[in-house]
Image (spheres, rainbow, N blue to C red):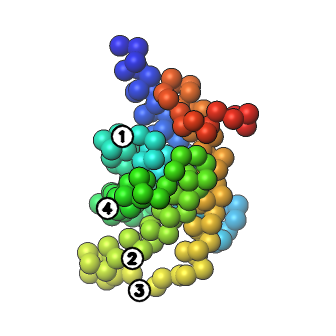
Amino acid sequence: MREIGFVALNYLLFGLLAELLAGFQSSLWLHVFGYFPSPYMWIAVLNYWILYRSIYESLIMSYIVAFAMATMTGAPLESAMCINLIVWGVIYLLRNRILWSGPNSYMLAAGISALVIPVASFTLSFFVDSRPAAEFYFYDWVLRALLTSAFALPLFYVFGFVDRLTQREPPKDTESEVV
């Protein structure tokens, strides 16, 4: 029974972190930095679970993150879920082929995810919406990917701390002196 409580606490803490990071991206960033492109903060939770959890756990977290993201943005829940599943598929395919363990790989996955999100959103809008999105901002796309990768590094160690707190096996590279 004690192990189930730690697993539930782990899911709860990561769900709260996803909600907090989505809130930071959608509201606080706008008030502090204006219209400068914001990083996809919420994608850090999803990437962590794709890289360091089983396929089923990462799919569950993909839906939890979609709920958190949909409440903070203007995207419908269906679009948020489709975008998260597309990101999940891309990172899961790259997980065993290109990505390795550690913070560098995690930052690379965050950057790849940030590059996939606008493309997936634009493509999904083209096929589903009656009035598809017509504008694609290249510099925003690149800046968001770079900022998402930069913010992923400290979040990697925060997520490792949450794993140790809930007695989950964190990635081996989080056991440094930083946390």
Q: Are marks 4 and 1 in contact (CB under 8 Å)?
A: no
Asked if 9 appears above or below 51 in the picture, the reply is above
Q: Which disc, if any, is residue 82? A: 4
- Taking the spot 58% from the left edge, 74% from the top edge, the residue there is 142
Whichever of labels 4 and 1 marks the residue nearer the N terminus, that label is 1
Asked if 126 appears above or below 46 in the picture, the reply is below
- Taking the spot 44% from the left edge, 68% from the top edge, the residue there is 116
Q: Estimate the spatial distance between the alpha carbons at disc 4 and disc 2, rounded to whole Å.
A: 12 Å
Q: Check disc 1 and report the residue beneath it.
A: 54
- Taking the spot 60% from the left edge, 32% from the top edge, the residue there is 161
Badge 2 amino acid = Phe
Whichever of labels 4 and 3 marks the residue nearer the N terminus, that label is 4
Badge 3 amino acid = Ala
Q: Estimate the spatial distance between the alpha carbons at disc 3 and disc 2, rounded to whole Å.
A: 8 Å
Number of residues whose C-alpha sits closer than 10 Å to that of mark 2, classed few (under 14), some (14–19) or many (20 or more): some
Q: Check disc 3 and report the residue beneath it.
A: 134
Residue 75 rendering spot, x and y as whole percentages = 39, 64
Q: Estimate the spatial distance between the alpha carbons at disc 1 and disc 2, rounded to whole Å.
A: 29 Å
Task: Quarter of the image for the C terminus: give it.
Answer: top right
Q: What is the secondary structure assignment of the residue under circle 3?
A: loop
- Taking the spot 59% from the left edge, 60% from the top edge, the residue there is 148
Whichever of labels 4 and 2 marks the residue nearer the N terminus, that label is 4
